[in-house]
Image (cartoon, rainbow, N blue to C red):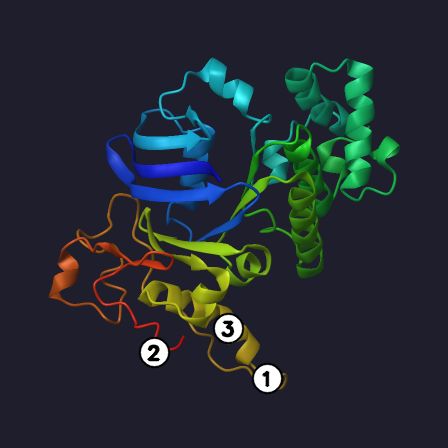
């Protein structure tokens, strides 16, 4: 059953188009990964879904949460959805948490607003949530301020806040960027476990294909404000068709191919992501693509059904392995 459906969304800020013809859907309890380099439009897509876009933003198209249209929804009604039916884990918890409010009170605030719990009841529930996300002394740590916690602990607080009201879907924007590898794995395992336990869908946003592949059952690759490839995790990692996806795979696998004694040159993607509003006309990957031709000056069409690709010259999944 489709839970979230994004259709033909175009987004501009100050007259500069940053997202173009964005379309995808997420089913109930599905884990969807959204990957791409910084500047591809991933976080902006999440903010559009949450209704948290900056001033002078214009959005067209449709974003539906079940039977609720979100584009054009007034702030009062949107506020009732955030934290209740749809929640977001932001990239940097230190800037997302209130530095002047104790952790237990911040989590409890979500429960008071959306569940109508009293202050004592919400605080007790917040303490229980801290224990559920792995705090060893939840009663004591509920009284801590954000700066007294480690990066991994602050991210666990954000997860506790996100699942507090059993939302239908959680959007996780680069939730492990500032964490070391061990803590990163713990946070990802916890996120996967809790979303499965609560039966909510997950949209995991990352620039790291390996991170997404370990958690999600479906992956969408974003570049230049548009989805350029979409497939199941297995299909995408074994039979990638878009040149950009294959470049991401090469950089991800490059670390695994190094032996323990010598370090060769790490694979990289040629060029850089253009500045906002400066992507070339036609295919936005022009200028960086090894398969570019004159035809790429025209916007490519989306082909495929379960495995979709937006490219004039995709690699053939049946004849050319990744």
In this rendering, the label closer to the viewer, 1 or 3: 3
State yes or no: discs 1 and 3 in contact (Cβ < 8 Å). Answer: no
Q: Which residue lies furthest to the bottom in this view?
A: 261
CA gap, disc 1 and disc 3: 12 Å
Q: In this view, does 308 lie to the left or right of 77?
A: left
Examine the rendered structure and indicate whether residue 294 appears above or below residue 172: below
Residue 116 pos. (x, y %) = 70, 14
> Which numbered marker is on residue 259?
1
Examine the rendered structure and indicate whether residue 81 appears above or below residue 33: above
SS for dot 1: loop
Which mark sits nearer the N-terminus, 1 or 3?
A: 3
Residue 299 pos. (x, y %) = 18, 53
Examine the rendered structure and indicate whether residue 71 appears above or below residue 192: above
Question: From this viewpoint, is residue 316 visible?
Answer: yes
Residue 164 pos. (x, y %) = 69, 30
CA gap, disc 2 and disc 3: 18 Å
> Which numbered marker is on residue 320?
2
Q: In this view, does 87 lie to the left or right of 191?
A: left
Task: Please name the residue shown 74% across and 15% down the image.
Answer: 117
Which mark sits nearer the N-terminus, 2 or 3?
A: 3
């Amino acid at each position: 059953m489709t839970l979230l459906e994004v259709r033909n969304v175009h987004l501009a800020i100050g007259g500069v188009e940053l997202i173009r013809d964005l379309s995808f859907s997420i089913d109930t309890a599905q884990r969807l990964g959204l990957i791409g380099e910084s500047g591809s439009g991933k976080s902006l897509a999440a903010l559009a879904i949450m209704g948290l876009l900056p001033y002078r933003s214009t959005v067209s198209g449709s974003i539906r949460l079940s039977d609720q249209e979100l584009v054009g929804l007034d702030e009062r009604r949107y506020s009732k959805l955030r934290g209740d039916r749809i929640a977001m884990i932001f990239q940097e918890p230190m800037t997302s948490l209130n530095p002047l409010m104790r952790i237990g009170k911040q989590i409890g605030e979500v429960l008071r607003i959306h569940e109508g719990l009293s202050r004592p009841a919400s605080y007790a529930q917040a303490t229980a949530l801290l224990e559920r996300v792995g705090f060893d002394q939840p009663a004591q740590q509920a009284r801590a301020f954000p700066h007294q916690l480690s990066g991994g602990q602050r991210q666990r607080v954000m997860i506790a806040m996100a699942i507090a009201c059993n939302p239908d879907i959680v959007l996780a924007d680069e939730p492990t960027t500032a964490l070391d590898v061990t803590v990163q794995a713990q946070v990802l395992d916890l996120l996967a476990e809790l979303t499965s336990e609560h039966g909510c869908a997950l949209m995991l946003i990352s620039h790291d294909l390996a991170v997404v592949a370990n958690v999600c059952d479906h992956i969408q690759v974003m570049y230049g404000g548009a989805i350029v490839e979409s497939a199941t995790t297995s299909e995408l990692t074994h039979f990638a068709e878009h040149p950009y996806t294959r470049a991401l795979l090469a950089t991800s696998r490059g670390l695994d191919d190094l032996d323990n004694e010598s370090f060769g040159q790490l694979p990289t993607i040629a060029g850089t992501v253009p500045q906002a509003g400066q992507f070339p006309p036609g295919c936005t990957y022009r200028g960086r693509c090894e398969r570019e031709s004159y035809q790429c000056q025209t916007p490519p069409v989306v082909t495929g059904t379960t495995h979709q690709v937006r490219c004039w010259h995709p690699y053939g999944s049946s004849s050319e392995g990744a």
